[in-house]
Image: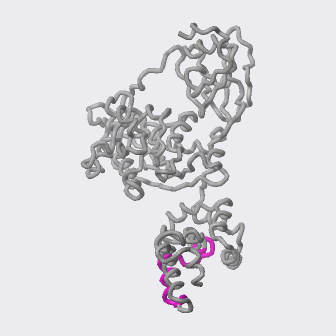
């Protein structure tokens, strides 16, 4: 069809997702691009692909413009994240079968030590699957049972077992709607048919999608709030693609950040210098090719190909079929669990959130006295909070960890200066007991009491603006100017 156009018909060709077919020398895409070689070709991708067979940089050249995840988060276009890393004893300590032990299918289990690299690939510990499903369920129950969730598994079999384990742990939700948990993989027609519903913010179901490869790219899951990694991920490209499912922001559905729950140490890739940097070209010249690649960026020490190469000459096929042993009676347990947050410098915070907050606040205010003076002198308390957030304060995360019912002022004083963590309601009750309002007239007292209730319910930021006097219940008491004149 494309040859119906003359080779010089187009001046500009823009290729979206250019890490796919267009970057491969023997692809139909490349044939079309070569036909229109006189046009300027611009490739767009979030994950440049660099393998022995496919190189975005070798074809398109060095990126003329790069926009990192860190920049996207700082500019408010992408959602920040927190990471929950969960270590399971059998993954780290290993498991060895007893002599002559057979699995549930009667297979003789090879006698060796099995570790995290084997889990769900060559060895299936059914109680491990149940434990992972339990931790996911506990998190959703404690936060939002209907938060859209993607669970990345090692293969289709693993995705199905995870789906069933989640169904077993959520009987009431599944009874309400059987699509609460669904497997969405390439071989499952019903699940694939529900993919559009999963990514549609207006559709409640499916809530949890277990998958392997299908949802790695091209899934605009704007309201996905939980990304679960129970997959062995060594490819930086795949890792970026998977966490990218959670980076969309949707203000209409209160989606401003997301959580990554990691069971197989995949998030260690965050610490790789290649995570937010440029990809690396892997170049193997042919017989007639020059020994120097068209583009030759320096290879950082110890960094290998971000994507494991496929066997040359073979198209991508179905998922690898591995010999698996299924064992149902091995006990497993969590031996370590920690929460990490995305910090202002684009790095995961590795110390405790309280210790980090104390340091962040004390950089600006070394004593409680200094902080109190700044707080009381500020016309708008939100300005003080914004200053601290720009310097690293993670107020929302801190509230979730310490006490959601505490005001920003009390959270800061408690964590940074060891003051009691009073809730907003306790603060409001203290004011009432001290009869501060008796010196005002009846109208003014009503306004102050209503403001105090607003504070107890929602915090200082929401009563910091005079516009609040135009809202209920103040609008029923009179106009804003009338209420102000009562003082």
Q: Does the magenta run of residues contain 415?
A: yes
Residue 158 seen in the figure: no
Q: Residue 169, relative to residue 214: is it above or below?
A: below
User: Residue 347: image x %, image y %?
Assistant: 63, 50
Residue in view at x 72 percent, y 31 percent: 64
> Toward which corner of the image does residue 277 lie, by quadrant?
top right
Q: Residue 427, relative to residue 331: is it above or below?
A: below
Q: Nearer the viewer, residue 237 or 23?
A: 23
SS assignment for the magenta stretch, majority: helix
Residue in view at x 56 percent, y 89 percent: 440
User: Residue 483: image x %, image y %?
Assistant: 55, 79
Q: Nearer the viewer, residue 460 or 468?
A: 468
Residue in view at x 65 percent, y 16 percent: 10
Q: In the figure, is residue 58 to the left or right of 187? A: right
Q: Nearer the viewer, residue 365 or 306?
A: 365
Magenta region: 413-437
User: Residue 33: image x %, image y %?
Assistant: 62, 15
């Amino acid at each position: 069809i494309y040859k119906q156009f003359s080779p010089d018909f187009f001046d500009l060709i823009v290729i979206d997702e250019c890490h796919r077919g267009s970057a491969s020398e023997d692809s139909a895409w490349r044939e079309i691009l070569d036909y229109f070689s006189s046009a300027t070709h611009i490739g767009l991708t979030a994950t440049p692909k660099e393998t022995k067979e496919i190189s975005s940089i070798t074809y398109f050249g060095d990126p003329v413009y790069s926009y990192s995840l860190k920049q996207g988060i700082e500019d408010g276009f992408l959602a920040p994240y927190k990471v929950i890393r969960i270590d399971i004893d059998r993954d780290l300590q290993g498991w060895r079968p007893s002599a002559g032990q057979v699995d549930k299918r009667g297979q003789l289990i090879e006698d060796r030590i099995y570790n995290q690299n084997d889990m769900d690939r060559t060895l299936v510990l059914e109680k491990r699957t149940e434990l992972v499903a339990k931790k996911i369920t506990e998190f959703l129950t404690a936060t939002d049972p209907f938060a859209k969730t993607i669970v990345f598994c090692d293969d289709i079999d693993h995705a199905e077992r995870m789906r069933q384990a989640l169904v077993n742990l959520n009987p009431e939700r599944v009874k309400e709607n059987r699509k609460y948990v669904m497997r969405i993989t390439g071989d499952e027609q019903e699940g694939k048919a529900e993919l559009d519903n999963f990514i549609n913010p207006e559709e409640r179901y499916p809530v949890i999608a277990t998958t392997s490869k299908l949802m790695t790219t091209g899934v605009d899951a704007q309201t996905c709030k939980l990304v679960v990694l129970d997959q062995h991920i060594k490819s930086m490209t795949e890792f970026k693609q998977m966490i990218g499912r959670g980076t969309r922001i949707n203000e209409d559905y209160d989606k401003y950040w997301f959580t990554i729950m990691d069971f197989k140490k995949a998030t260690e890739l965050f610490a790789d210098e290649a995570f937010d940097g440029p990809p690396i070209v892997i170049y193997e010249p042919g017989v007639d090719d020059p020994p120097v690649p068209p583009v030759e960026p320096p290879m950082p020490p110890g960094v290998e190909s971000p994507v494991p190469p496929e066997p040359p000459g073979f198209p991508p096929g179905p998922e690898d079929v591995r010999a698996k042993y299924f064992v149902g009676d091995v006990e497993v347990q969590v031996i370590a669990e920690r929460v990490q947050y995305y910090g202002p410098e684009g790095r995961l915070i590795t110390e405790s959130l309280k210790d980090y907050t104390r340091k962040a606040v004390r950089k600006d205010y070394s004593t409680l006295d200094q902080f109190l003076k700044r707080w009381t002198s500020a016309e708008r308390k939100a300005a003080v909070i914004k200053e601290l957030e720009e310097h690293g304060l993670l107020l929302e995360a801190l509230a979730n960890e310490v006490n959601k019912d505490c005001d920003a002022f009390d959270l800061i004083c408690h964590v940074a200066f060891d003051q009691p963590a009073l809730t907003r309601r306790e603060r409001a009750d203290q004011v009432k007991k001290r009869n501060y309002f008796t010196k005002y007239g009846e109208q003014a007292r009503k306004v102050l009491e209503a403001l105090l209730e607003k504070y107890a319910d929602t915090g200082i930021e929401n009563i910091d603006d005079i516009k609040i006097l135009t809202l209920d219940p103040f609008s029923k008491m009179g106009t804003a100017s009338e209420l102000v004149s009562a003082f």
